[in-house]
Amino acid sequence: MSSPTRRDVLRWGAAALPAAGGLLRPATARAAAVDPSAWMAALGDATPLTALTIPGTHDSCCTDPWHGTEWSHTQNWGVPEQLLRGIRFLDIRCNGLAGTADELGIYHSDAYQYLRLQDVLDQCRAFLAAHPGEVLVMRLRNEYAGGNRLEAPEFQRRVSHYLDDLGYRPLFWTAPSWPTLGQARGRVVLAADFANPWSVIQWSSGTNPWFATQDTFQGISLAAKARAVTDWFDRAYGDQGSARMYVDFTSYANGGWPKVNADAILPPVRDYLAARSRQPAHLGIVPMDFPDFHTDVLQLLLDKNFVPR
């Protein structure tokens, strides 16, 4: 039998390929054997964050359709439950908080989610105090929507107010490079999705020195969106030495409510991951809508961090 090509590996997944001597790889060490609330603690300090597969949520705080509509409802688990279940990337979007001079509220577009930024930060801090071996990544976005939108200088000023006046700076990793787990345990890695002159990790919904992101959220069919997700997994697989963090949004905003879209997109993603369950590879951050309805996908993503290499 001839040796498989890289194209074969991408098409079939490593689970379908024979190892040396014609034997299959040993069974994957299941992340199910690791407490999902502390799965990062089971990995070595020298592990770069960019060498992980990190389950995440899209519009992480949008848990109630009464705070908007079903269009703005993307999660059932709140942030504390997400973190206990193994989610380590949070998509936090803010506008100004009405009636205050310095605070930020959590929004989905112009729909206020009845949470303040300090509520979310306090939830993260409480989780990390109880699970000091874990690391969170937070995309902090200027949503810039509706009557409470903030211009760039004012948004930056309010973030500084949180970091320095309200004392949240020690919670964050704010260096301009991706850390190892050992460097950032117990902290939130800030990915700034707002205009700023700071020396921190800067978010990109495309490609920049820190990120390579797939976030196609409209203009294609649901089947094409699922293919965009798995194609980005293939790209990450072919770029395992990258210093960038790959990000692969499974969420989609056009053509149906988020739950309907998630139910169409995540099953093909599950099938892709299941076919490659023994393939040692890191896929980066994978933000999802409604992971509570697709815990098999969440488990497969966690498992990727424990495949023998």
Image (cartoon, rainbow, N blue to C red):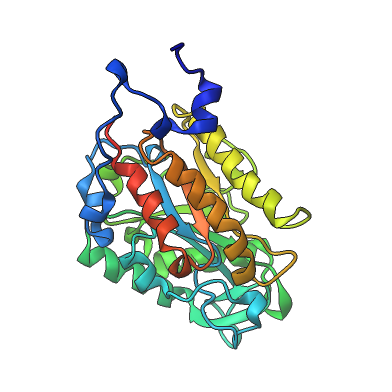
Left-right relation of 264 to 37:
right
Q: In this view of the protein, which residue sits in the foreground, 80 or 156?
A: 80
Q: Residue at x 69, y 66 (%)?
A: 151
Left-right relation of 211 to 35:
right
Is there any visible trace of residue 118 in the rendered image? yes
| Tally of numbered tags | 0
Across and down, in percent, residue 242 comes to 48, 29
Q: Residue at x 49, y 81 (%)?
A: 115
Across and down, in percent, residue 171 comes to 33, 60
Q: In this view of the protein, which residue sits in the foreground, 154 or 12?
A: 12
> Which of the 4 quarters of the picture holds residue 218?
bottom right
Across and down, in percent, residue 59 comes to 55, 67
- Image height check: is 100 above or below 173? below
- Image height check: is 75 above or below 221? below
Is there any visible trace of residue 205 in the rendered image? no
Left-right relation of 14 to 157:
left
- Which quarter of the rendered picture does the N terminus lie within? top left
Q: Residue furthest top?
A: 2
Across and down, in percent, residue 256 comes to 71, 70
Q: In this view of the protein, which residue sits in the foreground, 65 or 210?
A: 65
